Image (spheres, rainbow, N blue to C red):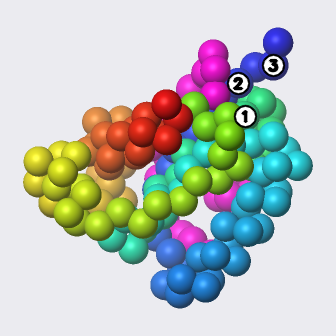
Amino acid sequence: MNNLKFVSYMSNQAQVLTNEGIEQLLFQIREKNKRLAITGILLLIQGKFVQYIEGEATEIDKVYEKIKLDSRHNDLVLLDSGELNTRQFKDWSMAYKKIGDDQIKEILGHAELNLDDLFLYPSQQKTHPVLKVLYNFTNSLST
């Protein structure tokens, strides 16, 4: 049995992408992920990328190392990682969702995420509300 792993991270866009730019990025990610059998979700929240990827552990490690070097974003913060028994996104090479403040408020009860605090205080990452937002969409798409 393959050793499954997941990684979730957040980063700033190096330059704000247009909708067309995001579509091109998603096309590239989806094609690459299909080849590598990686699945996941990319969220755009308050101008920041929040991504969850899953797959065979060695592939996830390789892809995450490349992601850290990708010039399209910066200030990358690892939010969570670990082993998986089963995929959350078996049918999604890369789901995408732009999250508005109204959706954040619906999930958290308030719209204030303070995403910049994660870059200043990365020790908060495992308990940060952005993970609740991410996993809310992970659960809704994977069921």
Residue 112 is situated, as x and y percent measured from the top left of the image, at 15, 60
| Direction left: furthest residue | 110
Element assignment for label 1: strand
Q: Residue at x 29, y 60 (%)?
A: 115
Name the residue carrying label 1: 55
Neighbour tally class for label 1: few under 14, some 14-19, many 20 plus, Cα within 10 Å: many
Of callouts 1 and 2, which one flags the residue occurring earlier in the amino acid sequence?
2
Q: Which mark is residue 64?
A: none
Q: Are marks 1 and 2 in contact (CB under 8 Å)?
A: yes
- Closest to the observer, 8 or 29: 29
Q: Amino acid at mark 3?
A: Asn
Q: Is residue 15 magenta?
A: no
In the rendered structure, the answer to whether residue 54 lies left or right of residue 80 reads: right
- Closest to the observer, 114 or 89: 89
Q: Are marks 3 and 1 in contact (CB under 8 Å)?
A: no
Q: Amino acid at mark 1?
A: Gly
Image position of 24 with respect to 105: above or below: below
- Closest to the observer, 121 or 34: 34
Q: Are marks 2 and 3 in contact (CB under 8 Å)?
A: yes
Q: Residue at x 62, y 83 (%)?
A: 21
Choose top left, top right, bottom left or bottom right for residue 68.
Answer: bottom right
Name the residue carrying label 2: 4
Residue 120 is situated, as x and y percent measured from the top left of the image, at 31, 59
Name the residue carrying label 3: 2
Specify start and end residues of the magenta stretch as a single range.
64-87
Q: Amino acid at mark 2?
A: Leu
Of callouts 3 and 1, which one flags the residue occurring earlier in the amino acid sequence?
3
Split into 4 quadrants, where in the image is the N terminus? top right
Q: Residue at x 47, y 61 (%)?
A: 97
Residue 57 is situated, as x and y percent measured from the top left of the image, at 75, 30
Gap in Å between the C-alphas at discs 1 and 2? 5 Å
